[in-house]
Amino acid sequence: MSAARRAPATAGKNAASFSKKLEKLGIRSRFDLVLHLPMRYEDETALTAVDRAPPGVPVQVEAGIVRAEVAYRPRRQLVVHAMAGDSALALRFFNFYPSQLKLFERAIAEGKRVRAFGEIRLGRGGAEMTHPRYRIVNPGEPLPEALTPVYPAAAGIAQPMLRSAVLDALKAEPIEDSLPPGMRKRYALQDFAFAVRFLHTPPPGIDPAELIERTHPAWQRVKFDELLAQQLSMRMHYLARRSRSAPLLPGSGPLLKKFLGALPFRLTRAQQRCLAEIAADIAQPHPMQRLLQGDVGSGKTILAALAALAAVDAGWQAAVMAPTEILSEQHFRKFSEWLAPLGVRIVWLHGGLGKKDRRAALEALSTEKVGVVIGTHALFQEGVDFARLALAVVDEQHRFGVQQRLALRKKADGGGIVPHQLMMSATPIPRTLSMSYYADLDVSVIDELPPGRTPVKTRLISNVRRREVLERIREACAAGEQAYWVCPLIEESETLDLQTALDTYAELQAEFTGLEVGLLHGRLPPIDKASVMQAFKENRLQLLVCTTVIEVGVDVPNASLMVIEHAERFGLAQLHQLRGRVGRGHRESDCVLLYASPLSQMARARLKAIYESADGFEIARADLSLRGPGEYLGERQSGAPLLRFADLEKDEPMIAVVREAAGRMLAEFPDEARAHVERWLGSRRDLARV
């Protein structure tokens, strides 16, 4: 492709500067301009009389300019006095350039008129528009024949510049259809070129609701193509992984059989189903890429341990990576309790290891003396080498980026062998996300809790009733129970007026002189974190003041009460995870959400959702609805860019159809499928999940 083809159609000495500004919008080619579709439209195809303008609705009027002046009431402004028929109209500009005054004065001299688009309001001097969009026109100049598109823009890019660039691209760029005619007919889709041109220049008379709600057939075609590109990209990566080689882990070795036979509890039906799916995957000669999701306390860790034991049984190694040291220590204790009696050597790589112990652990890991290694990001750092890595387990996978997971996978032995990967998440993924952003993964769901888990009662309490909460803490600890008090910050913040963990710790120590109060936060040295958590587990501490460092991986069955300070500041997923730290024993448990008024609309919606439901999937759906997929996914690198045109909730029925279309297109039209992905994703394909 030539440089001229790549560059957006601009001319003059500012072309390079304009191109750089367009790059901020992700526009690097003429075809990117073709796909830069309007976010809304304005109707400039008709004129409205000043005295008939509906309140609060932008309209277009045409008027003759009477005079233009710079006024100082109450501050400097450009006022253009005009007459539209028998109605006077003032156009006010508080931020203006001297050239604008000269433009209007010249227009008066030349007998020209002004067309202004904006909201008409009644001021002290009569009808007026403030900072309208305007154009100087000749008398009798025809009106536009299409609605005026309003595009997503960036600083320094005016709408007229964007419209001109888009129209130039539409004229110069051949818009070929990437879908075969048979597929267009099968799914009742408009021609792509027609749909795109229609959306850039919709004719008057179109139902505006169809454009605003994006239900018009032209929008449906664009959304179908966008979703199809995402699905095709995911499936291509899935097929590419299936072509690689992985160790065979049959899952029928003596250690696994012995462990299953000695389990003191029965796996739930959901656990058994998920275990069977994992076992079937790791027994194949291609790498597993499975996401195991289940609510807090559903029993994911035991399945990870069983998969790790299958690797050890087959003469290979397993690695378990967790996002926090507390969670990695929890895994180390659990795995040691379960697997060490079978003779499996387990190593925990963490920041508290001395140089001598760390050197010994790394040496054992590289010489097959270790069956399972557990740690945090340290697992993929330089100097950590595995003798025979067959399985990589990534817990709370959404907290790790693509490159981090890839770095762990690359720790495997050479020779073209790729380890199996099991990703786990206690943040359930809504069905629409699972069908789109996780379409290249096999998904197992533990959809039931083990017996004996006590439901947690959630209570919303205003901060003005703080004294009642303190008394509830006193009663619970006096009855032999333990409690968490979660704070959002560690130290004083200049921008957020929040109760800090350090202040709260001091306050609660003074309040509960007869109780042992501990403090846990992310800045404590690893050895101190471990010491505090061990004291809490052994009930040597009755009340633990902490930050969200205890969000995952903390299991203290005797803790039956949690207070979350400034709950309105936490996300839904965080609140649900934190709440899951209580109710792990047989006592009735409470989670108190302590909030400060006034609440924003978003905060009120979050607290309402967490109060009304304990179902992680329902909470995840509400979270997605409140935040949208971009914010919901956070900084996680997905297999495709976030959707620009399709809406995961509104277009859920289309997603199911597109999934079927993607499979058909890959099977019947592989060349067209690759071209379609290139059109929509281009250079962004390298973000695909690995």
Image: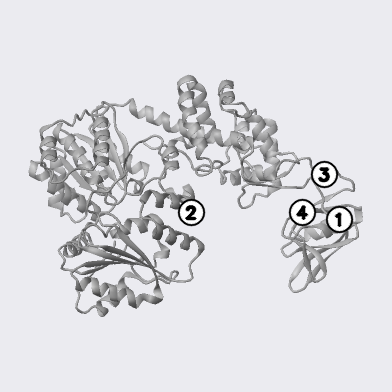
- Checking the image for residue 143, the label placed there is 3
- Checking the image for residue 59, the label placed there is 4
Check disc 1 and report its element: helix, strand or loop. Answer: strand
Picture quarter with the C terminus:
top left
Residue type for callout 3: Leu
Picture quarter with the N terminus:
top right
- Checking the image for residue 63, the label placed there is 1
Marks 4 and 3 sit apart, C-alpha to C-alpha, by 14 Å
Residue type for callout 4: Val
Labels 3 and 1: the sequence-earlier one: 1
Residue type for callout 1: Ala
Query: Depth check: 177 or 67 in front?
Result: 177
Disc 3 crowd rating (10 Å Cα; few below 14, some 14-19, many 20+) is: few
Labels 3 and 2: the sequence-earlier one: 3
Q: In this view, does 53 lie above or below 228?
A: below
Percent position (x, y) of residue 277?
Answer: 27, 34
Disc 4 crowd rating (10 Å Cα; few below 14, some 14-19, many 20+) is: many
Check disc 4 and report its element: helix, strand or loop. Answer: strand
* Closer mark to the observer between disc 1 and disc 2: 2
Describe residue 359's horizontal placement relative to residue 548 as left or right.
left
- Checking the image for residue 626, the label placed there is 2
Residue type for callout 2: Leu
Disc 2 crowd rating (10 Å Cα; few below 14, some 14-19, many 20+) is: some
Q: Do the residues labelled 4 and 3 touch (CB within 8 Å)?
A: no
Residue 63 in view (yes/no): yes
Check disc 2 and report its element: helix, strand or loop. Answer: helix
Q: In this view, does 550 lie above or below 497?
A: above
Marks 3 and 1 sit apart, C-alpha to C-alpha, by 14 Å
Percent position (x, y) of residue 547?
Answer: 31, 64
Query: Depth check: 384 or 628 in front?
Result: 628
Marks 4 and 2 sit apart, C-alpha to C-alpha, by 32 Å
* Closer mark to the observer between disc 4 and disc 2: 2
